[in-house]
Image (cartoon, helix red, strand yellow):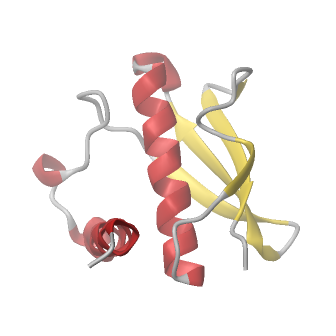
């Protein structure tokens, strides 16, 4: 099995169980739990925004939580983990609004 297929399989598995995971079984990033939310931008399903609450707990952890949320979204909606980030986890100038780290990306079709 290709490495990319294994990554997609792992992300899909994580997405399937996130709604029913006990607090003790949450995915941690840099040892901390971050609430991340993904929403469509301008009703376009392929363009999305990720917000991660409380990034001051660990900026590296918040970046990875945002990346994880974006990858999960693209896998769920398009079947692959490719993302074209306009503002993403690897962007130097991060955008923080109201104590939320904000990313924006697009799932290539």
Query: Could you say which is closer to the camera, residue 7 or residue 51?
Result: 7
Return the x and y of residue 52 as percentages of the image width and height: 54, 40
Residue displayed at 50% across by 74% down? 75
Query: Could you say which is closer to the camera, residue 75 or residue 98?
Result: 75
The image quadrant that residue 38 belongs to is bottom right
The image quadrant that residue 7 belongs to is bottom left
Is any atom of residue 97 visible in this view? no
Query: Could you say which is closer to the camera, residue 48 or residue 74?
Result: 74
Q: Is residue 62 left or right of residue 30?
A: right
The image quadrant that residue 45 belongs to is bottom right
Q: Is residue 93 left or right of residue 4?
A: right
Is any atom of residue 89 visible in this view? yes
- Residue 27's place in the image compared with 39, above or below, is above
Q: Is residue 49 left or right of residue 67?
A: right
Q: Is residue 45 left or right of residue 65?
A: right
Residue displayed at 61% across by 25% down? 99
Residue at the extreme front: 2
Return the x and y of residue 85 as percentages of the image width and height: 72, 49
Return the x and y of residue 13 as percentages of the image width and height: 27, 74
Q: Quadrant of the C terminus?
A: bottom right
Q: Quadrant of the N terminus?
A: bottom left
- Residue 27's place in the image compared with 19, above or below, is above
Residue at the extreme right: 42
Residue displayed at 52% across by 82% down? 79
Residue displayed at 59% across by 36% down? 89
């Amino acid at each position: 099995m290709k490495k990319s297929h294994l990554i997609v399989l792992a992300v899909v598995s994580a997405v399937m169980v996130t709604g029913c995971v006990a607090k003790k079984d949450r995915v941690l990033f840099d040892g901390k739990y971050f609430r991340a939310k993904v929403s469509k931008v301008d009703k376009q399903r392929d363009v999305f925004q990720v917000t991660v609450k409380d990034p001051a707990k660990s900026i590296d952890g918040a970046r990875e939580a945002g990346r994880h949320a974006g990858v999960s979204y693209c896998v769920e909606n398009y079947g692959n983990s490719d993302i074209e980030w306009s503002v993403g986890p690897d962007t130097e100038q991060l955008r923080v609004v109201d104590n939320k780290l904000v990313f924006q990306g697009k799932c290539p079709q």
